[in-house]
Image (tube, rainbow, N blue to C red):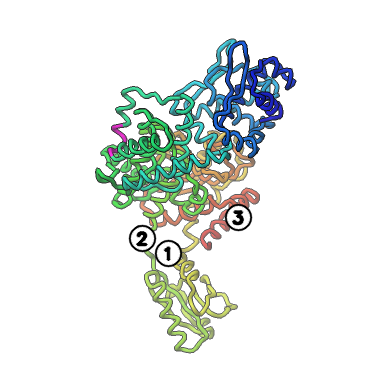
Amino acid sequence: MDDKMEKILISLESGDFKTAKMIAVETGISEKTARTRIKELDYYLKSNGARIISKRHYGYRLEIQDTDEYHEFRISGNARENTIPNNSNERVFYILAYLLNHPDYIKLDDLSEFLCISRNTLTADLAKVEYILNMYHLNITRKPNHGICVSGEEFYKRSCIANSLIKRDRLGIKNKKQTDVMKMIGNIIIEVLQKNKMKISESSFENLIIHVYVANGRIHKGYKMVLNEESRSDIRTNISENTLVAAKEFAQQMDQKLSIIYSEEEILYFAIHMGGKISSDSSGKYGSNIIISSQIDEMVLHMLEVVYESHKLDFRYNLELRMALNQHMVPFTIRMQYDIPLKNPMLEQMKREYAFAFTIASTACASLKKYYRKEVVEDEIGYFAVLFALAIEKRDRIINKKNIVVVCMSGRGTSQLFMYKYKQAFGKYIDKMYECSVFELEKFDFSSKRIDYVFTTVPLDISLGVPIFEISLFLEDREILNYSRLFAMGKDEILLKYYDKRLFTNSLDGNDKEIVLQKMCELAGKYYSIPDDFYESVCKREELGQTDLGNLIAIPHPCKVMTKDSFVVAAVLGKPVWWGHNDVQVVFLVSLSEEEDADIEYFYQMTTNFLFDAEAVNTLIQNPEFDVLLRLLDEMRRK
């Protein structure tokens, strides 16, 4: 509250009825503004042990319902913490909270006077508020001589409050009683989950508490969940029997411990949120919670087919991945149907650590748009990326074994032990291993023996024509990991199969992504044979889902493999271009060959690792040259 509202409260603490005119004179505001501020004050007091009573011809009076709670509210400083915002960003969320929590219309003049801003400033802030509301299928209704209010379903109002206000800490949940209530809600949820043998992640658990807290507040204020019979039937069809039983048990606990009565609609509302968050390996009284329908399995198969068509990466016969995706899709489908996406606190880390898998997951999830008629948000893509990353790690791969030379200055016994350790650590990657002294190196036949690498325990000051790695006599875990990756990945020349200096540009001008993509396709057409509908296919892929993945990068590509040769058109733009979700300045237009390619996974690993490395991308933007790109890609391999 600001000083004016504080004065109103002090005035009403006398215990007497006071008219709006009397309060206006005492606080130095207009009578109309006084009424508006009193309504706002009453909103704060209702959750802090008091309320303001209005009586015709008498005015307003403060009624304290819980002396201890109200006393704590006054002493703790909460009464002064909720100040009127003084910048646009704070005002947007303040206005959003006000409109969502007040059913009556409010006139723009009253609201602008209340916020101490001009009508033009309020209009600009309202445009931002409306943008947030639209994301939740809500609108601002304008009525002549009455003002504005929020219109839309209660379901989406609660989602908006939870995601835009509570999770962003815009409502300032600092009151001890409120904190205690949330802890009690959490304890009840844990009890119900354990009883019904359900599992839930920590982030999902916190998310569920928030949605219950919001629901309880709305129920307390008289905002009821309303569902027609068709909606009720759909929910019962989509939610497992075990989840519905758990939801009813939760409602009973809420009644017993918090005296909040859940209607049938409220129980179904809770069941939706629970069903969209429980883990796929949960089990209960009625067996597994996860029932995989033929439609879900069909969607998973389509995802894997699209990944193959777009990237020539074949997971179609990976039964373990297919089952993992099927199980994940069950709660995911609930979240998509009811617009309750699961926030991913590890999203940025997942994008960095699993860059390759995240790119695959983005393509797979883009194929789901036709089923759900909406895009899959990045938070959800991150969870799919983990499943693909695990499949990549477990997948058996054809290993091109290497021939190496080991140089050791120690005695023969130590040298033999050293060789044994290398065979033990890297046996599956090594075909032939040769032992050699420093003096024998100059006469060693590297060509006929097809040597790939030299490993030495002593510095070598000679040129051998192959990479030389200085190593310790006793292998450390870090070295084993690094050299295993080296043997598994192969040589740098593989990248030159895909990156062509002629297809690198730092002079491409374009103010929007369509122009940028068109010019990049035209550049590809100068040096490679591409079909007439290549550009249209690239644009169609853009419509399916985002290819801009943050970090100023985008990886557009056609919907399917369309060219005889593989190539990458790499463009560093002079200035960022809005790509639909993020600004983009580095664009890699990827087209893959119709022929089978054993190196394609290596290409994607190196490329995505580079694109998700903010420092590397920034280096390329500051030095937009083809040689710099190759050097940065090489550094990704060395890492």
Identify the residue at horizontal 49%, vertical 79% (top origin). Answer: 474
Label 3 – label 1 distance at C-alpha? 25 Å
Nearer-N-terminus badge (3/1) = 1
For label 1, the crowd category at 10 Å Cα-Cα, with few meaning under 14, some 14 to 19 and many 20 or more, is some
Q: Which mark is residue 488?
A: 1
Q: Nearer the viewer, mark 3 or mark 1?
A: 1
Residue type at mark 3 is: Val
The residue carrying pointer 3 sits among few (fewer than 14), some (14 to 19) or many (20 or more) residues within 10 Å by Cα, namely: some
The span shown in magenta is: 236-241
Residue at position x 57%, y 56% in the image: 632
- Residue at the spot x=45%, y=81% of the render? 418
* First of labels 2, 1 by sequence position: 2
Q: Given the image, on which type of amino acid does mark 1 rest?
A: Ala
**Which residue was labeled with disc 2?**
397
Question: Majority secondary structure of the magenta segment?
Answer: helix
Left or right: 303 as drawn, with respect to 550: left
Q: Quadrant of residue 342?
A: top left
In the image, 466 versus 332, the foreground residue is 332
